Amino acid sequence: MTPRVATPAARPLDALRFTTGGPPQLTALVTDHLRLLGARPEPVPAPPGAEGRVRLSGDGATPVDARIRWAPPGGELVDEATVQAATGVMAVHGRRHGTPRGLAVDWVSTATGVLTVQGLLAALLARARGGTVERVTTRADHAALLTVSQYLAAAGATEAEAVEPAPGGPPFTSADGVRFELETLDSGDWAAFWRALDAPADAIRTGWLPFQFRYATGCAPFPPALHRTTRAHGFAAVRRAAATTGVDVCRLHTLAERAAEHDGAAPWALTPLDAGRPHPLAPPAPAAAPERPLAGLTVLEAGRRIQAPLAAHLLGLLGADVVRIEPPGGDPLRGMPPTCAGTSARWLALNRGKRAVRIDIKDPADRARLRELAAGADVFLHNWAPGKAAQLGLDAPDLARVNPALVYAYTGGWADRLADAPMGTDFMVQARTGVGEAARPADEPPAPSLLTLLDVLGGLLGAEAVLAGLLLRERSGHGVRVDSSLLGAADTLTAPALRRAAAGEAPRSPAGFRRPLRTADGWVAPADAGAAAAARHDLGRLTTEAALARLHAHGLGATRVTTDLTDPAHDPRLPGAISRDAHGAPTVVAPWSFA
């Protein structure tokens, strides 16, 4: 068979053009990312409308169309606020406060935009491999459910949480008023840090578990004594205690600070691994069904926590065969409570359907096995600590020697873009990049969201980068290294706020923005466009149903706020969005449909 190669290309879409139309909230990020990937905008946009529309064309091929919808037409879910409310996003973000709160950033729109670009790239990749995909549809309600899928899975599990969700959490405040995050993965370092600040022993002991599980529960009910302890010390003393005990601390930076240092880098980087002769790729698999455009491709994933496992999960939803590299004895997070049929519900949300291979990467023989697996894979994806892959002889140049056509993907923390970067975990990156300001309206003190915004968005961007790398490989015949990061996720999420800050404008959303309204038996969330008018209505003595009827009678969009995360599985606003897997765990359907 003739090798499937083409002339080398720096960007995978540089031969294509696109048009966009519909609500900018749904299409702006898609436009930005298509430009970054090389596509050129047509001078005449598509007509406006209630749904987002994108058309990619060029090279004489049939165009690929994308449709972007908030939810099924005719319902109450009509914008960012109402989708956040119905899907549980407000419930999880509000756990720290004990009441639902809307994210002041356009979280759902951002996730939906990234997923739409993924769908377009997957469609083009399917075509390059002999398929016939002409249209992809992305739903924002499904995208939102995907972003909270771990919390939905835990709520539907058959046992209780290890730490019962309750109000509370970081950041901490020093005696001189500095708000800061702290991070450690070691219970001994945690205890040593607090002892250095003279915290009570019982508070140190009982505070570790909620701190350790805050990624999973969306809250951290610390003993009040820990907050009192930091308020008794200046930030300089806090930093000294951290430096001597192995704990990382980071003060909450402002959006203005981040805007001043922002380098304008794209959220991912694509780097050809071999500039020599193109390498013939394997013959394409038989044309797959449209809904599985990556069928026949193999993804080798060595991921931990959320970022890389979620990226690989998305590639699996698109049809790839995902082989998960786990340590001897298996991934310890398989047993993380709560469980379904003995397996962690949260783990299943990110890893169901993957095949597992146990490899000890510290053992030379096992590393040789891993290289053999990489020789037959299309993608190798990991989020190991910086420098670990090179130390093990498993970095991009190492694996390119055994598979010159490999797409080597790294989903990291900082992408080597900040000299003074703290530990590259979700909440530390939120603190360092101003996300704590952007996520909350102007009348709330800055605080990173415990919804793990950046781990999730980092996983979505990681999958987008892999798809771009695979498409570039199809065009050039060369292997590609793709890098994405939590820093890129932060800048993507806060891009509108950073632009306002750079222009000298107030970067944060106004006071009370996306704050649900209390009813006699629950909460309602007005659509953004009518929120101010809705807030003038006295709804506190009305049932939620009556409150919605009143707002709708006045022409105001609004919907009920989901507070019980078991509700979306049978919510008529979200038909068919959630099913159950073989373990009985809730599972969110794929956010795209192809035709």
Image (cartoon, rainbow, N blue to C red):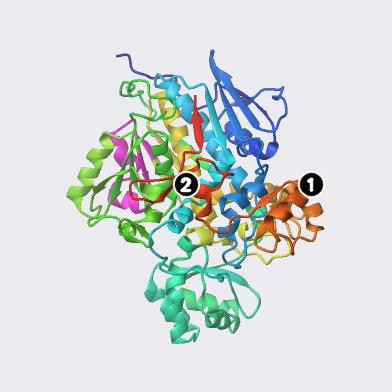
Front one among 130 and 589 = 589
The residue wearing badge 1 is 553
The answer to whether residue 266 shows anywhere in this view is no
Mark 2, Cα crowd under 10 Å, few <14 / some 14-19 / many 20+, is many
Mark carried by residue 336: none
Instruction: Name which residue type carries label 1.
Output: Ala
Quarter containing the N terminus: top left
Question: Is residue 231 shown in magenta?
Answer: no
Instruction: Specify start and end residues of the magenta stretch as a single range.
Output: 380-408
The residue wearing badge 2 is 459
Query: Mark 1 or mark 2, which has the lower sequence index?
Result: 2
Question: Is residue 389 shown in magenta?
Answer: yes
Give the quadrant of residue 385: bottom left
Depth check, mark 1 against mark 2: the one in front is: 1
Mark 1, Cα crowd under 10 Å, few <14 / some 14-19 / many 20+, is few
Q: Are marks 1 and 2 in contact (CB under 8 Å)?
A: no
Secondary-structure class at tag 1: helix
Secondary-structure class at tag 2: helix
Position in image of residue 58 (x %, y %): 56, 17
Front one among 343 and 112 = 343
The answer to whether residue 317 shows anywhere in this view is yes
Position in image of residue 542 (x %, y %): 73, 60
Instruction: Name which residue type carries label 2.
Output: Gly
In this rendering, position of residue 75 left or right of residue 500: left
Position in image of residue 340 (x %, y %): 35, 56
Residue at point 31% right, 20% down? 283
Front one among 57 and 591 = 591
Residue at point 38% right, 61% down? 338
Above-or-below relation of 159 to 418? below
Above-or-below relation of 55 to 191? above
In this rendering, position of residue 310 left or right of residue 546: left
